[in-house]
Amino acid sequence: MRRTVYLFYLLFLLQTITAFAQSTNPKREFRGAWIATVQNIDWPTKGASTASQKQALINILDRLKAVNINAVMFQIRPECDALYNSTIEPWSYYLTGIQGQAPNPFYDPLQFAIEEAHKRGMELHAWFNPYRVERSVGNYTTAVNHISKTHPEWTFTKSGVKILDPGLPQVRNYVVSVIMDVVRRYDIDAVHFDDYFYLDGMGTEDAATFASYNPTNLNLADWRRNNVNTLVKMIDDNIQLVKPNVKWGISPRGIWRPGYPDSTITGNDNYNSIYCDAMAWLRTQSIDYINPQLYWKFTGHQDYGKLMPWWADSAGVHNRHMYVGHAVYRIASGNEPFNAAEIPKQIKLNRTDQDCQGSVLYNTNTTINNPLGFYDSLKILYKYPAIPPTMNWKDFVIPNPPSNLRYDKLADNRGDGLFWNEPSVASDGDVASKYVVYKFATPTVQPSDLENSSNMNNIVGTTYAEIKTENVTQTMYFGVTALDKNNNESDLSSIIPVQITIPSRPIVISPDDLAINQRDTIKFVWENTAHSNYNRLQIASDPNFNDLIVNQNNIVDTFKTVTGFRGLTTYYWRITASNLAGESITSVARSFTTGFPIPPQLLLPLDQTYISSISTKLVWKKSNSATRYRLQLAEGLSIVPSKTILDTVVTDTSLIVNNLKDKSFYTWSVMAANNFGSSALASVFKFNTGTSTNIMDDNRSLPTSYVLDQNFPNPFNPITRISFSIPENGFTVIKIYNLLGQQIAVLINQDLAAGSYFTEFNAEKYPSGIYIYVLQSGSYILSKKMMLIK
């Protein structure tokens, strides 16, 4: 190896950290992120609807695109299953919750991911686990066409993990067939493996295979490594034959074997622990990139400062790419957690080494959840877009440049953007796969301007793009280049000037001004103002818009549906239109008045009282314009469907209810309605059917702990109040005991919702003395003493 002294890199990093802060955005850099589907680590939510899963993946890709990630390692085969439409293996359990069951409504997750990634100018590397059959045997029911059932003789199990036997030729052929099925049918950019090969701690699980399939009499360890090497070479040969522009990479453990690059490096390795020889793949050039998982800090027995240069040197010597795998999941988590500066420091060191072409982040959810501000740090580390590096052993013919660059109205998106025509087919038959949009300060572009990443405005997979910029006060000049599958870049298109101006005053459409009898849900509609990207909607209860009840910006549609208005009330509304240049003046304001009633006022029985009957008359005040009322009555201290015993519509303002339970709590309310809609429910009233006060809601905010207050007054004669709070719903009991431990009264014995309450104890028939009152709710028990003096 041509690098033997690694201390230099650390010293160089420390001495030049300030300079790196000014130049940490190379034009060419691989910036990947793993999207793990096994155990639903990153995506999808198992069993969620098709629409929900799609939107979740869109959200992930949008967040990655926002920090200029340019590739995703998308896991499509975690356990000999498929997150794509396969005739060979069953649908994944992690997709639908039932292995073998297709999503309904149907969609193909891999195809969807490819389309969405490519739209955003990202590569998609299809991530396969080559051997794993079941990560935990019996965790779920496998499908009838799962390999564990169709060919159980191809598998072995160790410590509850079942894998395909790598030593069987038929297994290698099977794995290659699965991978090449995807390569042939899908527009993937690469095939990707992680670090799952043989299992750690192997014993004699494959002894029969070793005896039968070892024609060159290798020792056991070399034979196992050769089995993996053979599969890696078979995959490479097949890809080169079928689609040579598809890349092929593996992400092994970060230690090749103990003692490399020096004797201080120790830990779980590839060579002896899981029988894979990454150096053999590089020597034979059977892969296009190596992506070692350097999941450690600087210094120590897995010193990043030593391992990264060694891996880079190993790949560079054999003319292959090296991208580092970074452990984002270790930021502020687990044993020896990373601090906020650890991975940014690693990325900066990567950029000092010409043989390290980039990074891959594990895992995606952790990354976008911004541990210790790491996601935010990517906005600086990856401030500008980057093109993945070309592979000079593959195609090196540049594509033809795009033509007819223009600034026009976007068809699929709101507002204006850049458009261009797809270039003609290049001399080697390649077509453009994505495009780089450049923004310049002047129309005269020098070659150095194309090498300056700060001039890169966007990378997309479409023939149009929104303009991304922070400064539009002056005329901007744009050009576009084309990239092929190997990221060869074309010459620059023609340059066009663009000047963005603030949109004109928008025009509102509906509801009409002074509209009356509006419902509680209203759709507001306005014109699509020329050159605008989004709108702001403001709704207020006063004509000066001092009391805003809606102030929503970034509305990309030209309508917005709003609900929750109050009945018989006048409101005022207006909009603005915005683009990158700024926000327009407000539209002409309009007003409207709702036509549905306001909630009625409840009258009898009074709130938080008791009645000495199991029948009562519920009475409320007439609400203006109401033609009918909906009354709801529920057992307990809140109105919930499971406890509602009466839900009826009446035209009068009272209703007699009979056959209530004695000594029980009830909650009731009424909403008013007419032909234009319904009010909200009136504030609830509560009552108790009993001959003595029992319990009432104390109308406090929701408690956070169990509390039993001292009774008041204390001493007392003969009545005292006992207040208490419970933070969770539960069966609640309050009992009274004398000093002999004899129970003399039960004040409460029922389910209660979380809240604060009081009850009263009437000791008229008991002698003076000390008494104990006990609160039990769920598993919590609290008690206090009180004194009766007559």
Image: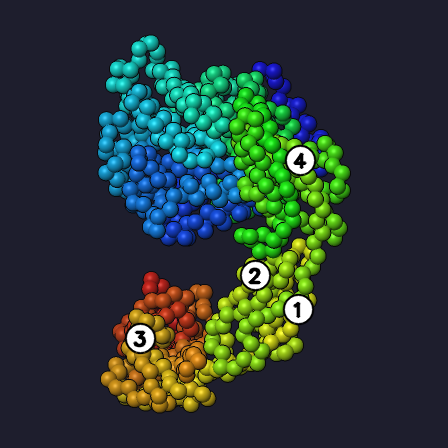
Give whichever of 274, 591 is nearer the camera.
Answer: 591
Residue 555's tag is: 2
Mark before the other along the chain sequence, 4 or 3: 4
Mark before the other along the chain sequence, 4 or 2: 4
Tell me how far mark 3 sits from mark 1, CA to CA: 47 Å
Task: Determine if residue 321 is in view.
Answer: no
SS of the residue under disc 2? strand
Q: Is residue 675 above or below residue 34?
A: below
SS of the residue under disc 1? loop
Residue drawn 26% across and 83% down?
A: 660
Residue 644's tag is: 3
SS of the residue under disc 3? strand
Provide the residue designation for mark 4. Answer: 492
Dot 4 surroundings within 10 Å: few (below 14), some, or many (20 or more)?
A: many
Q: Quadrant of residue 423?
A: top right
Mark before the other along the chain sequence, 2 or 1: 2
- Could you tell me residue 78's position as x and y percent? 37, 36
Residue 586's tag is: 1
Q: Which amino acid type corresponds to the residue marked 3 in the rendered image?
A: Thr
State if disc 2 and disc 3 touch (CB < 8 Å): no
Residue drawn 26% across and 40% down?
A: 143
Tell me how far mark 1 sits from mark 4, CA to CA: 41 Å
Mark before the other along the chain sequence, 3 or 1: 1
- Could you tell me residue 289's position as x and y percent? 51, 26
Mark before the other along the chain sequence, 1 or 4: 4
Tell me how far mark 3 sits from mark 2, CA to CA: 39 Å
Dot 3 surroundings within 10 Å: few (below 14), some, or many (20 or more)?
A: some
Quarter of the rendering occupied by the N terminus: top right
